[in-house]
Amino acid sequence: MSPKTEAVSSRSARLLSALFYAVSSFLIVLINKSVLTSYRFPSYAFLGVGQMGVTLLLLYIGKAKGIITFPDFDKDIPRKLFPLPLLYIGNHLTGLSSTQKLSLPMFTVLRKFAILFTLLLEMIILRKRYSLSVALSILAIVIGAFIAASFDLSFNLEGYTIVLLNDLFTAAYGVYTKEKINPKELGKYGVLFYNAAFMILPTLLFTIWTGEFEKVIHYNHWSNFYFALQFFLACIMGFMLLYAIVLCSYYNSALTTTVVGALKNVSIAYIGIFIGGDYVFSWLNFIGLNICMAGGAAYSFVSLWETPQPADAQSHSCSWEEQKTALSQVTNTKILIDSKDVTDTK
């Protein structure tokens, strides 16, 4: 396969994986909202248990049938997976409590800092470097979010702290997922399987401790076919979303995954302007949304459509000064060897 064909294939994989994540994220919001709001299902945590259970079942069957592969469990698995389970718990708990502390506009603004945190953590942990155009597009998204919510700048220290912690957990989870899905570590499916395996029991115990498990047992809609179907679909979509996140991070980066999630939320806001009837028009909000979307479009163009430089090309792209220094060292070494040979002959 020619380098040009490989670049097009890589670009297609990056674009399709990002679209797959955006669509999966959008659909699961609709299904979860129907299950938890329309049918008033009493436990979001038990829904999470169902989603992790389906993830384990599907991946186990896939491995048993030889469709997918991931490492068998051994004593090194917890070390290889760490700290993903802890970051997942932190992200889950802070995410649930953060929505109760702030108004929706300020929550939307502060959640955009997850993008900035992801950028910084990728530079620190993964040693990645980004161009000025990427940094400016990220800055546009954050500034646009501030403008969109500038009419509701109510200060709440506890709320700000929890949301920013949620941003940090989200960024760290994405960055470490990118690191762990390396085939030399656990791979895509290994990260999905073992993270769900380590988290399903603590989450189930949490539902028992809070009394939600008993409410789930006595829930009166289990015999409702339409609810049961939507609950099953929510569990399937939970697996699809987790897989989409890993796939998008694998072909792109943790930063791209975070940006796609943010753009999905902006798109939902756009849809809410025309559908739903509860959107209150404000020029600041509308301008801010457009700046966010423009920044996201610029980032998408730079990150998704650029042609990746082959690794061998990168390895040979040293500067002339480095080549001259290396040549000088080789020449000096040869002179020393020749001098030693002359001395030995005498």
Image (cartoon, rainbow, N blue to C red):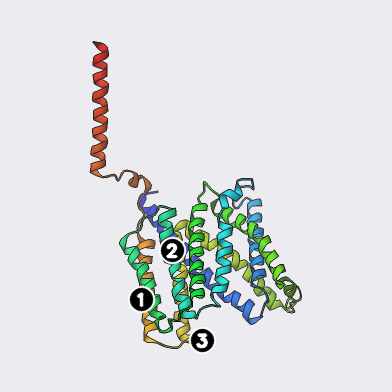
Q: Amino acid at mark 2?
A: Phe
Label 2 environment density (alpha carbons within 10 Å; few <14, some 14–19, many ≥20): many
Observer-nearest of 150 and 70: 150
Is residue 33 among the parts visible in the rendering? Answer: yes
**Res 242 quadrant in image:** bottom right
- Residue 79 position in % (x across, y down): 58, 49
Mark 1 / mark 2, whichever is N-terminal: 2
Label 3 environment density (alpha carbons within 10 Å; few <14, some 14–19, many ≥20): few
178 left or right, relative to 77: left
Label 2 sits on residue: 117
Q: Are marks 1 and 2 in contact (CB under 8 Å)?
A: no
How far apart are the alpha carbons under marks 2 and 3?
Answer: 33 Å
Observer-nearest of 195 and 243: 195
Label 3 sits on residue: 276
Q: Amino acid at mark 1?
A: Ile
Q: Secondary structure at mark 2?
A: helix
- Residue 289 position in % (x across, y down): 39, 78
For image coordinates 60% across by 74% down, the residue present is 32
For image coordinates 60% across by 52% down, the residue present is 67
Is residue 13 among the parts visible in the rendering? Answer: no
Relative to 14, say whether 113 is above or below.
Answer: below
Quadrant, the C terminus: top left
Q: Amino acid at mark 3?
A: Gly
Identity of the residue furthest to the front in this view: 157
Relative to 262, say whether 320 is above or below.
Answer: above
Relative to 205, say whether 74 is above or below.
Answer: above
Label 1 sits on residue: 291
Mark 3 / mark 1, whichever is N-terminal: 3
Relative to 308, say whether 329 is above or below.
Answer: above
Q: Nearer the viewer, mark 1 or mark 2?
A: 2
Q: Which mark is drawn over residue 47? A: none
- Residue 59 position in % (x across, y down): 63, 56
